[in-house]
């Protein structure tokens, strides 16, 4: 598997209930015997009696009660905001009656606006004169997955649920030299809707949110006039209570079923742009319908070179073509990439849409392209027998698999054949294919160059795993079969050619002191690295201590030999790896064991590649790239986010459809493999379905199971029964929630006494 694209797999309490102003009035004017200190920080106002006495469960005298003025004094003198526990201690309100009085006073003063409680649960004086920093009102923004109040980071909270677009009142303070914002209240909720699944239960319908920014139920203020159980709806948030958000159904997103329903729902819930603005449509309409080679005599003419595209059976956009021939000491390898930058100019309408989308989104029943189809499927797609503009990376590959020379230039090309991986694999296996002799000769040299590149890859220690995924076969929008993804040498041949071109792009720009976006993949860190060591240790294989490197991981895999569960350890390695991202700062590529790496080969579907193309063209034409370092940083964050978004939608739709595929088989028994072990249970993959379900710890039997992270196992205290990573089990499908991608499982043959309601079962769930 090309690790360049490797996949990795309690709502806080709500607002305090509003109380009437009578709560505050009932406590007004009452004294407090034990105020700890005055505003000046001197001795306490009232000394305790010399002989201690028991505090009554209910205060008997009015003078025992804390007043609003005294509570303000405590908050004013505190070096930092106080939470509930700190206030109880500071006011000596340990008894039940005192706690009740303190809570009522806090609620009353909060209602009256004398005290504010921020989103973390801390209490502040509302009077700006009593605060080191006054409260301000502003709109929250989300950048790189983090909320900001203006230019200040919002502290993580537990009391208020916050979203981008919320208009809030917040205090900005400095902690350890870093400015942070504490949100006191939401003044107005964001107009952006949340997407979720409508659930009709008796008289109280609710919506199960499917939006990534909020997971949980949304209580409906009024039942919707339209919508059936299971429909996808958009909800306008109007408030929140202790359980979560409250709101009203604004519209129906999808009332269908199957692939279309899943796709429409998750595209909407993740905010993926699907419609083209009018300015973009008009810009696409102004593009030429075809390429006239005579108009591009300033480019290299490669029309006679037998370049071919090699892609999957269902591919529609072809952005790379390859050719190879033998040269002295190795091979000439030509990688031609669609010249998208020729048509998509920086700052134009097409560029703005491409930047916003960042990546194309590939789903089982559709593609949401980064560029309009006039470009992605026509003018920029390297379709067979049609002239196209291309950016070419021409390399010399030595017999040891090293790139000993390279050159970038603009060209006019023509793809001679549209080949598939299956047909190329047929050639690699038999040495024959029904194509032109020139194409056949090129394929032969590509095969030889690939063998050399493969040796070089292994010598530098790059990771390379067999894939363990399923591809969905649809019929009338529903899954009719799931087939294993088979990765052949035809796939690897193209991967190695593209990797070589990507490395050359990074080297070329570095040598010409030009900035662009690197594809950065850092080593595993912290807990993930330790968990990987523990998993290998449980299998009797030692992973060297210290910083992990690809060679040490490859060595550990070799020690596993030909174990049948080897693929599970490969999956664990993939999960342990950090997520690859785009950045103008080079940190190398861990998975490919490369010191530098950029993306150059897919500008039709990745904006990062378009940035690299523009930088290369700027060097070729002797001009500046016209982008700043700050813009590159922001661009890297944007395209990294859109890549994660595209992956989340793709995985979510596949998980949804796989769950629907087995939903009619609730109650049946399946063979499965334990793919993950946690404190709360086992994640079991149903064999042949490539979908995982949860076997909760309470379903393992009438025993108390201890989680052993080193052994990656759950072990029963009394029985000694052991459930470990890689174990094969028979499980019964109990419940399916397709929209959440969730399966609940039971052991097919539970031992006598198994119960999820017994004492040990309850303890295990806790």
Image (cartoon, rainbow, N blue to C red):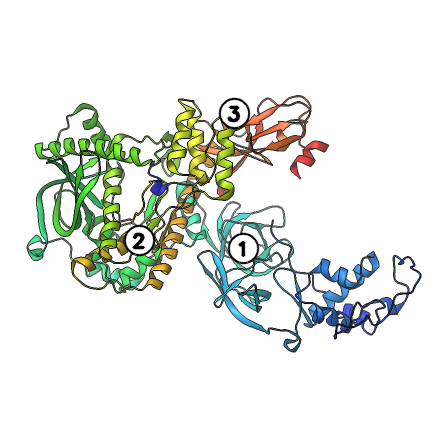
With 93 as the anchor, is 332 left or right in this view?
left
Left or right: 335 as drawn, with respect to 204:
left
- Look at mark 1 in the image and give the residue it sits on: 225
The residue lying toward the viewer, choosing from 383 and 393, is: 393
Task: Evaluate whether residue 365 shows in this view.
Answer: no
Q: Quadrant of residue 86?
A: bottom right
Residue found 76% across the figure and 71% down from its top: 68
Q: Is residue 570 left or right of residue 114?
A: left
**Element type at mark 2:** helix
Residue 471 point in image, percent of width and height = 36, 34
Which label lies toward us, 2 or 1?
Answer: 2
- Of the pair 500 and 487, the residue shown nearer to us: 500
SS under mark 3 = loop
Measured as percent of width and height from the top left, residue 762 is found at 69, 36
Q: Residues within 10 Å of mark 3 (few under 14, many from 20)?
A: some
The residue carrying mark 3 is: 727
Residue count near mark 2 (Cα–Cα under 10 Å), binned few <14, some 14–19, many ≥20: many
Estimate the spatial distance between the alpha carbons at disc 3 and disc 2, rounded to whole Å.
42 Å
Q: Residue at x 52, y 70 (%)?
A: 138
Q: Earlier in the sequence, mark 3 or mark 1?
A: 1
Q: Note whether 165 is above or below 231 in the view shown.
A: below
Tell which of 467 and 672 is nearer to you.
467
Q: Which residue sits at x=81%, y=57%?
A: 94
Mark 2–mark 1 Cα distance, whole angstroms, equals 45 Å
Q: Position of residue 73 (x, y in %)?
A: 74, 72
In what quadrant of the picture does the N terminus appear? Answer: top left
Tag 3–tag 1 contact (CB < 8 Å): no
Task: Specify which label sits upstream in the sequence, 3 or 2.
Answer: 2
Check disc 2 and report the residue beneath it: 608
For this view, does 264 lie left or right of residue 276?
right
Nearer the camera: disc 3 or disc 1: 3
> Which sits earlier in the primary sequence, circle 2 or circle 1?
1
């Amino acid at each position: 598997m090309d690790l360049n694209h490797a996949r990795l797999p309690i709502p806080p309490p709500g607002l305090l209930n509003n109380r009437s102003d009578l709560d505050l009035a009932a406590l007004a004017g009452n004294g407090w015997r034990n105020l700890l200190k005055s505003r000046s920080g001197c001795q306490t106002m009232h000394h305790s009696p010399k002989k201690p006495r028991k505090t009554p469960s209910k205060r008997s005298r009015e003078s025992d009660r804390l007043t609003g003025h005294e509570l303000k004094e405590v908050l004013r003198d505190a070096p930092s905001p106080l939470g509930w526990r700190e206030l109880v201690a500071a006011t000596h309100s340990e008894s039940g009656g005192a706690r009740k009085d303190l809570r009522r006073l806090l609620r009353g003063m909060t209602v009256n606006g004398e005290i504010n409680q921020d989103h973390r649960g801390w209490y502040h004086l509302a009077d700006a004169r009593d605060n080191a920093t006054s409260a301000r009102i502003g709109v929250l923004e989300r950048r790189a997955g983090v909320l900001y109040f203006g230019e200040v980071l919002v502290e993580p909270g537990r009391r208020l649920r916050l979203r981008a677009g919320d208009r809030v009142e917040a205090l900005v303070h400095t902690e350890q030299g870093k400015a942070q914002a504490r949100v006191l209240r939401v003044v107005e909720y964001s107009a952006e809707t949340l997407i979720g699944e409508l659930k009709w239960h008796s008289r109280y319908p609710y919506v199960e949110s499917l939006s990534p920014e909020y997971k949980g139920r949304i209580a409906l203020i009024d039942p919707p006039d339209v919508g059936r159980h299971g429909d996808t709806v958009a909800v306008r948030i109007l408030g929140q209570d202790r359980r979560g958000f409250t709101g009203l159904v604004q519209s129906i997103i999808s009332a269908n079923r199957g692939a279309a329903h899943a796709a429409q729902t998750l595209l909407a819930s993740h905010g993926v742009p699907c419609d083209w603005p009018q300015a973009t449509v008009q810009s696409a309409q102004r593009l030429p319908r075809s390429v006239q080679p005579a108009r591009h005599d300033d480019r290299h003419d490669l029309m006679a070179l037998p370049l071919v595209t090699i892609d999957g059976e269902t591919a529609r956009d072809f952005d790379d073509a390859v050719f190879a021939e033998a040269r002295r000491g190795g091979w000439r390898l030509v990688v031609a990439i669609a010249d998208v930058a020729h048509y998509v100019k920086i700052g134009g309408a097409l560029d703005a849409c491409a930047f916003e989308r960042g990546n194309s989104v590939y789903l089982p029943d559709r593609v949401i392209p980064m560029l309009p189809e006039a470009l992605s499927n026509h003018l920029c797609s390297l379709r067979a027998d049609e002239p196209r503009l291309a950016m070419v990376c021409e390399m010399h590959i030595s017999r040891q698999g090293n790139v000993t020379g390279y050159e970038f230039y603009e060209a006019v090309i023509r793809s001679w054949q549209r080949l598939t991986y299956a047909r190329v694999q047929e050639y690699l296996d038999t040495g024959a294919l029904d194509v032109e002799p020139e194409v056949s000769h090129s394929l032969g040299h590509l095969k030889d160059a690939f063998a050399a590149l493969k040796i070089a890859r292994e010598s530098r220690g790059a990771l390379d795993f067999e894939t363990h995924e399923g591809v969905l076969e649809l019929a009338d929008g529903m899954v009719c079969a799931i087939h294993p993804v088979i990765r052949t040498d035809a796939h690897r041949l193209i991967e190695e050619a593209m990797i070589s071109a990507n490395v050359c792009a990074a080297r070329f720009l570095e040598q010409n002191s030009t900035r662009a976006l690197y594809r950065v993949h850092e080593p595993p860190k912290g807990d993930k690295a330790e968990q990987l060591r523990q998993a290998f240790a449980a299998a009797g294989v030692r992973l060297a201590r210290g910083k992990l490197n690809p060679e040490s991981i490859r060595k550990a895999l070799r020690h596993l030999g030909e174990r049948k569960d080897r693929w599970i350890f490969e999956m664990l390695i993939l999960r342990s790896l950090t997520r690859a991202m785009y950045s103008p700062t080079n940190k190398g590529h861990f998975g490919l064991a490369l010191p530098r790496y950029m993306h150059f080969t897919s500008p039709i579907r990745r904006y990062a590649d378009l940035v690299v193309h523009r930088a290369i063209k700027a060097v070729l034409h002797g001009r500046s790239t016209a982008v700043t370092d700050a813009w590159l940083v922001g661009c890297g964050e944007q395209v990294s986010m859109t890549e994660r978004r595209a992956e989340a939608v793709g995985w979510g739709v596949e998980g949804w459809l796989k769950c629907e595929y087995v939903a009619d088989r609730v109650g049946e028994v399946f063979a499965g493999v334990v793919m993950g072990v946690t404190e709360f249970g086992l994640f079991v993959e149903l064999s042949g379905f490539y979908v995982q379900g949860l076997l909760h710890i309470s379903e393992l039997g009438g025993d108390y199971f201890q989680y052993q992270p080193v052994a990656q196992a759950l072990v029963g205290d009394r029985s000694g029964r052991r459930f470990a990573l890689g174990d094969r089990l028979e499980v019964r499908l109990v419940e399916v929630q397709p929209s959440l991608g969730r399966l609940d499982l039971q052991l097919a043959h539970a031992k006598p006494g198994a119960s999820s309601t017994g004492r040990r079962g309850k303890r295990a769930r806790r």
